Image (spheres, rainbow, N blue to C red):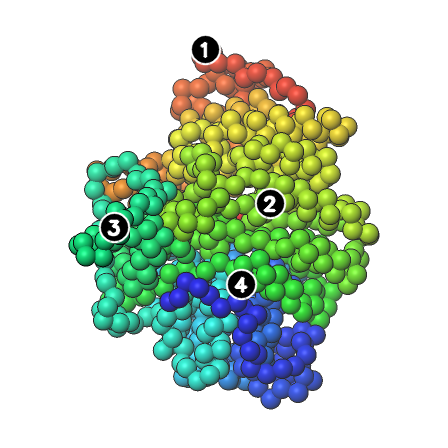
Amino acid sequence: MNPVATPLYDYAPARHGRPAPFLPMSRDEMAALGWDECDVVLVSGDCYIDHPSFGMALVGRLLEAQGLRVGIIAQPEWDSAEPYKALGRPRLFFGVTAGNMDSMINRYTADRRPRSDDAYTPDGVAGRRPDRAVTIYSQRCREAYPGVQIMIGGIEGSLRRIAQYDYWSDKVRQSALVYAKADLLLFGNAERALVEVAHRVAAGEKLREIRDVRGTAFMTAHGWMPAHDWAVLDSSTVDVPGRVDPHPDPYAMESEKQGPACNDPAAPQPIRIQTKAERIAARQAERLRTVVRIPAYEAVAHDPVLYAHASRTLHLESNPGNARAMVQQHGERDVWLNPPPIPLTTPEMDYVYGLAYARNPHPSYGKAHIPAWEMIRFSINIMRGCFGGCTFCSITEHEGRIIQSRSEQSILKEIEDIRDKTEDFKGHISDLGGPTANMYRLACKDPQIEQSCRRLSCVYPGICENLNTDHSHLIQLYRKARAIPGVKKITIGSGLRYDLAVESPEYIKELVTHHVSGYLKIAPEHTEDGPLSKMMKPGIGSFERFKQLFEHYSRQAGKQQYLIPYFIAAHPGTRDEDMLNLALWLKRNGFKPDQVQAFTPTPMALATTMWHTGRNPLRKLARSSEKVLVVKDAKQRRLHKAFLRYHDPENWPILREGLMAMGRADLIGHSPNHLVPPAQGEKRAAAPRRGPVPTPRGNAGAGRKVGPGKRR
């Protein structure tokens, strides 16, 4: 596995041809293009929207640019194999994904109830994809064409590449490879692996024979090794499950000292001491021939400590610059994970986002309303990845910590394409962002430090001294974008990392003056140190500083603008008292959240490990190590959510009951110092107050409801 990657645009295409208006979804469309077969057929749980924000379109257009004929089977029925024969047997392979979301998160709420809609389906109709769609689709493809090659991927495959806790069945499930019986799994943003694998398969290799590509996982016989010179490390030597020790310095660098000089050729020559660069190169070469064996599925399924240990090890081996391959036994076979893919360069990002997208839903959907499409129709993705490391979020596990940014020229051209080619464009670009709006072109100041680092976050517990937090590139992009003729307004719809923003007051001024349309969503997630430490989020003081700057520059611009804060209820590490303190903070600041979120354990996330094991994987582990409070009782979870919507009369009964149980009856009453009013006919509680609730000050959020928004 060579860490030096071939650029995506340097492969010779299998055949030349003009891009299809839309990738075909029927035999008639194939015939119109003059095709008698497809090289690759993509199966997805989402409807087909030919836009780079939708993984199926991005993958399909990328393969098309490699000279392959790509067809789409979108949201097929799953009770028989017939829908999977719609485009015939693919010459190379089926590519299977659940879509832009894990199918279980897409279909069920945090309370495990079926959702009433699906944003990725025409007219928002629910129930158009099966549970664990990657597995079901793969099985139906195999039934349709026995012996066909199958590759799985997307966020569902990526987050389920090893044994993982599944919230909806409340058990540890095996790797998706085991259930899907696929030949190869691609994880992360897999463009690089996809292109290499597709060309090798086109040249005659079998998917099941490809074992050396970064960003891929596969099943193999237990004990298989790629070569005799590979070393196997037990994961306990990487992260010993023992007493909690201080973390070693992840930035410790080698000295540059050389051996003593000697000019006499007859004298004994001293042993030459390697330079820092040589030692780093030697370690990297050694890592490329090392595999870390983590505890087997059978072990982690029944031992919480080993599950937490495996989770921690997986996250420690996530930096492409130093990650090693990993292997996990499943019965008589092994799941082998190669190191993560090398991130795309800026020219490669430009190439991927500059392909021949139609930027519209497939014509077969007619005038159907597709909520996800409406949300991103006039938005532009300027970067990917996130170095925040929030434990409840899946972005890092899927896209990685290294920020991959597009060039200004590529972004500005896409704005012009929207202006010139998109129907009903009125001059409003709804977003210039990505997973985090203000991480554009932010990176480690030293590439060698970046390659050596094993920290889980660049901004927790504080912003790393080696992180470049200069927002000038983003400010310049904003200014050039809004200067494009025909563009009347650009707002920022992606979530903002406020602890980074406060490092650049000039950025906040630019944002508030020109790119906020009355409201700006932001995610402090909590106010209390206990849950924040388990989220790996900054203290509420960072939010307060941002809020002050936001209000200052809003007044300076002569605008009345409001922050929309998001919070999580029932996150691991959260006590009832923490939620009460959050509710008091909300009332004190005049915030009245409308839509709130209870913690949902997503596959592979560190917070999910806390939920399942009751232990903190952010520390080295032992059976007596730090325990984490987990809120699993349904009534207690409802109470935590009710604290966030303290102003809703429907929540007052459960809040009264909860406050009485907590000994805080002093917060039940009619004055501004109380959290909820007493029940009808009841007198105000006689218990003494333990502290007043100050009346709201200022106008940030005063009397406003928090509106809906996109969550990570």
Mark 4 to mark 2: distance in Å? 23 Å
Mark 4 to mark 3: distance in Å? 64 Å
Q: Which residue is mark 3?
A: 262
Give the side of residue 84 with respect to residue 485, left or right: left
Q: Residue at x 70, y 65 (%)?
A: 360
Does residue 370 appear in the picture of this structure?
A: yes
Disc 2 residue type? Ala
Mark 3 to mark 1: distance in Å? 83 Å
Q: Nearer the viewer, mark 2 or mark 3?
A: 3
Q: Nearer the viewer, mark 4 or mark 2?
A: 2
The tag on residue 437 is 2
Disc 1 residue type? Pro
Q: Nearer the viewer, mark 1 or mark 4?
A: 4
Q: Quadrant of residue 88?
A: bottom right
Q: Residue at x 25, y 66 (%)?
A: 230
What element does badge 3 sit on?
loop
Disc 3 residue type? Cys
Mark 1 to mark 4: distance in Å? 54 Å
User: Badge 4: few (under 14), some or many (20 or more) residues near its Cα, within 10 Å?
Assistant: many
User: Badge 2: few (under 14), some or many (20 or more) residues near its Cα, within 10 Å?
Assistant: many
Disc 4 residue type? Gly
> Does label 2 or label 1 sit earlier along the sequence?
2
Q: Which residue is mark 1?
A: 688
What element does badge 4 sit on?
loop
Q: Quadrant of residue 620?
A: top left
Give the side of residue 505 with respect to residue 268, left or right: right
Give the side of residue 479 with respect to residue 144, left or right: right
Q: Which residue is mark 4?
A: 99
